[in-house]
Structure formats: C-alpha cells, structure tokens
Image: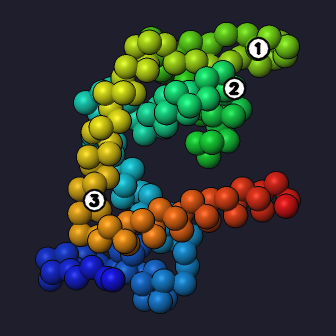
Amino acid sequence: MSLSTTDADTDTDDTAADIAAADGGHVISFLVRHVWLGMRAAIEGELAEFGLTVPQFATLMMLDHAPGMSIAEVARACGTTRQAANEMVTGLQEQGLVERAPHPTDRRVQQLTATEAGRETFRRAGPAVRRREEELEAGLSPELRRAGREWMAALAISCALQEKGA
C-alpha cells in the first residue's frame, strides 16, 4: 500500500524523502533517519507541554522499565555520548525527575532512577506521544502499521546482534 499525496504535499524541493525515493528507496538508513527526524520534531512539540525533550522522555521511559541504568547505558540506548547523556540527565535531575545513587559494587558508576515526579511525568506525557504518533500514522492501514513495527523490531535485533559481533 502506498499513500497518495496531493499537489500541496509535493511542492517542496528535493526533500530527503524525495531523494531517497528517487533511488527506489534503496538507502534504507537514509529513509529511517528522515522518518526519525520528522517524528522527533512532531513529538518534541508534544513533549514541550511537559517540559521534556525527546531524549529526556526516552530516558524516563527506559528508567521506568529498567531502573538503575548508568549514564553509559543511557548514552548507548539514546545513541549519544556519555557527556551529552550526563548533561541531559542533569537537566532531569534539576527538575526533580531523576535521582543518582552510587552503584553498590562499582564506585565509578552512578545508578539512575526516576523519582515519583519523574514516573508521573512519564505517565502523563506517554499518551500525548502515542496520540501524536497515531496522528502521523493516520493514513496507514493497520496491516501496514503492524508490518512497519515488525520490520523495525527485527532490524533493531539484527543491528544489535551485528554490534555484538554475533
């Protein structure tokens, strides 16, 4: 299934999607990046209401599922440097959304946990993010949505295995 576009939708000059489509969509990483940048901008607008950025929301989501992560683990999961992750977590900490505690066996590592305020902010922001994602997917069939999610999950696993050298 493909989405149809109106003339108003196609008035832009050589967008990233147009360039990738001209190649027959063979540069998957370019298309994925273009989608991510568009979705990130849309989601960032929703998160502003909660005083969060996309990386901060992602960090609260990760800490909700895996409390005790280190800065290095957050950096890897967000695809950023430890320095950038540390600065982002400092912002969350200053808002009272995250706490740092010493690791029980490695004094060089700090464990991160969401505070009750952080968990509540995540719970309140989640529906706004999901609603915006649903708006972005509105023109897609349920089958295409499901196939897209399955493809992304499988490719994420493949990339993780390659990264580990499997």
Colouring chosen for the image of the structure: rainbow
Instruction: Tell me the quarter of the picture where residue 73 sits.
Output: top right
Instruction: Decide: few, some or many residues near mark 1? Use Cα within 10 Å; few <14, some 14-19, many ≥20.
Output: some
Question: In the rendered view, would you say 162 is above or below 115?
Answer: below
Residue type pointed to by label 1: His
Q: CA distance from mark 2 to mark 1?
A: 9 Å
Q: Is disc 2 placed on a helix, strand or loop?
A: loop
Q: Residue 154: x, y in percent?
A: 61, 64
Residue type pointed to by label 3: Leu
- Residue toward you, 166 or 58: 166
Sequence order check, earlier mark of 3 and 2:
2
* Mark 2 in CB contact with mark 1 (< 8 angstroms): yes
Q: Is disc 1 placed on a helix, strand or loop?
A: loop
Please tell me the numbered disc located at residue 136: 3
Sequence order check, earlier mark of 1 and 3:
1
Q: Quadrant of the C terminus?
A: bottom right
Q: Quadrant of the N terminus?
A: bottom left
* 115 left or right, relative to 77: left
Question: In the rendered view, would you say 105 is above or below 130?
Answer: above
Instruction: Tell me the quarter of the picture where residue 44 sits.
Output: top left
* Mark 3 in CB contact with mark 2 (< 8 angstroms): no
Q: CA distance from mark 1 to mark 3?
A: 40 Å
Sequence order check, earlier mark of 2 and 1:
2
Instruction: Decide: few, some or many residues near mark 3? Use Cα within 10 Å; few <14, some 14-19, many ≥20.
Output: few
Whether residue 105 is visible here, answered yes or no, is yes
Please tell me the numbered disc located at residue 103: 1
Counting every numbered tag in the picture gives 3
Q: Residue 70: x, y in percent?
A: 69, 26
Residue type pointed to by label 2: Ser
* 85 left or right, relative to 147: right
Residue annotated with mark 2: 70
* Mark 1 in CB contact with mark 3 (< 8 angstroms): no
